[in-house]
Amino acid sequence: VPDHLEPLLATLERRDDLSATERDALVSSPWLLRRFSAESEIISFGQLVEESCFIAEGFAARTVHLMSGARQFTSVHVLGDFVDLHGLLLRRMDHDVVALTDCRMAFLHHSRLKDISTDHPHLWRLLSTTVAIDGAIQRQWIAALGRRQAPSRLAHLLCELFVRLEIVGVARDYSYQLPITQHVLADVLGLSVVHTNRALQELRARELVSWKGSRVCILDWSGLARLGEFSPEYLNLVHEPR
Amino acid sequence: VPDHLEPLLATLERRDDLSATERDALVSSPWLLRRFSAESEIISFGQLVEESCFIAEGFAARTVHLMSGARQFTSVHVLGDFVDLHGLLLRRMDHDVVALTDCRMAFLHHSRLKDISTDHPHLWRLLSTTVAIDGAIQRQWIAALGRRQAPSRLAHLLCELFVRLEIVGVARDYSYQLPITQHVLADVLGLSVVHTNRALQELRARELVSWKGSRVCILDWSGLARLGEFSPEYLNLVHEPR
DNA sequence: CGCTAGGTTGAGGTACGTCAAGCTAAGTGG
DNA sequence: CCACTTAGCTTGACGTACCTCAACCTAGCG
């Protein structure tokens, strides 16, 4: 199995077993690796997409631009996330996908994905499940934006990212690399940069997290989870036949 | 074609043609109609669902409850919307679905939906597309909650609901029935009831909408769309082969 | 050594929340 | 037909979470 496929397999196998043929269907597919530098656009609004991609390295995010010039990231994506599988259904993209850090993306042509959907229905169901989980993540985020204040929102985000990064093996001991600026973080949280900074400082003052350079350490998991009202059911972490 | 299926067919046929066999597959399915009174729970958090349903009459919404006791609706659903098709993929529901008004829901067992997915792949793709559109709606809403203020959010919501209701034939002449209280509206907008009321009054003062009893009239579509930065691409209104 | 991107801090403004009161219309019982 | 109740809407006063602007600080980096 080539290295770059490991995170995708990990995400899928966290939810259900893959048969040897299913693994092979993925491994033998003609993935195309492309590099993107931080802040560059991976997929653009309105684009007619003919292929879909997952993250083989780095962080990416969906973003909506407002007339005022402000932007809002609608979801953050990590290693192993299929960021535009729904492009197969929605012919034109309704948003941009941008690289938050330097990224490697693995592309697969839609024709091949359609083959997978007919030849390997169970594998396809698992892939679709990741899209459904994305939806669940978005719902949680709507609740956070609508009803929670800054420190709680940030706490929720940091908890969720830890769990998702742990699945693909790049987080352990309650710690992970998150090489994004507070400016980007603000556009995820729906806050100003200044207020984002203050929210972060509150988490530090309460000794819930430390965040130096690009390394996030969760010092008090249960405290952070309580503040962010984080409870991971919506991430579908149960391993079961699907 | 029985009456209660019309809105579902309208939603699907707005995006692509259905063949006679595809229509028949839906019409001949053993739908089970159930009534729900306003404020009652249609599907509960954590429930293991074995069937999925669409709205044959009324309004429903997904809702997340917070520890503080507050709630946030994460999406509003109208006539013809399949509210829990993803329950087929996520074994357990990550949220509640509640009736906003008195509702009639049409249920279909998952086994039958699975049959449709294998026997009628194009129909299944269209059904999946509605789930993907739901995701796009949620992304727009995240942007609204994160970056727009109250009157703009409300304007966006009213524009979107008009378009969605027009598709299923229950809105015309920029007017529709929306029998919900400002309390419910506040939990959609992520605002307090008082501020929701003031946002609504601003729209009235600007002569963008009138809202008396349960009837919403959009008096100035382009003004409202401008205020809400509403642009309907994300609703996938293009009729094309999918 | 100076430049720059990013982080931090303070001061003052605004959009929103909370509380509390009053209003209106529909429903209920006598 | 009229009290009385009640749910929902509206208004005002006041507090707070967050925003904006502007300055300063820090750590790379050429």
Image (cartoon, coloured by chain):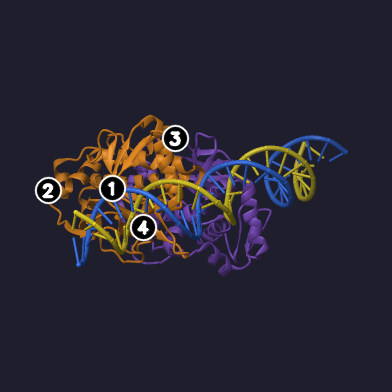
Chain colours: A purple, B orange, C blue, D yellow
Quadrant, the C terminus of chain B? top left
- Tell me the residue at 31%/58% (across/down): B98
Mark 3 falls within which chain? B
- Residue A180 is tagged as none
Q: Earlier in the sequence, mark 3 or mark 2?
A: 2
Residue B179 in sight from this viewpoint: yes
Give the residue number, with chain letter if any, for mark 2: B2
Contact? badges 3 and 2 (CB < 8 Å): no
Amino acid tagged 3: Leu
- Rendering coords of residue D22 (x, y %): 73, 38
Mark 1 falls within which chain? B
Measured Cα–Cα span from mark 4 to mark 1: 42 Å
Looking at the rendering, which quadrant does residue B40 occupy? Answer: bottom left
Secondary structure of residue under mark 3: helix
Give the residue number, with chain letter if any, for mark 1: B78
Secondary structure of residue under mark 1: loop
Give the residue number, with chain letter if any, for mark 4: A21
Q: How packed is label 3: few (under 14 Cα within 10 Å), some, or many (20 or more)? A: some
- Tell me the residue at 41%/36% (across/down): B205
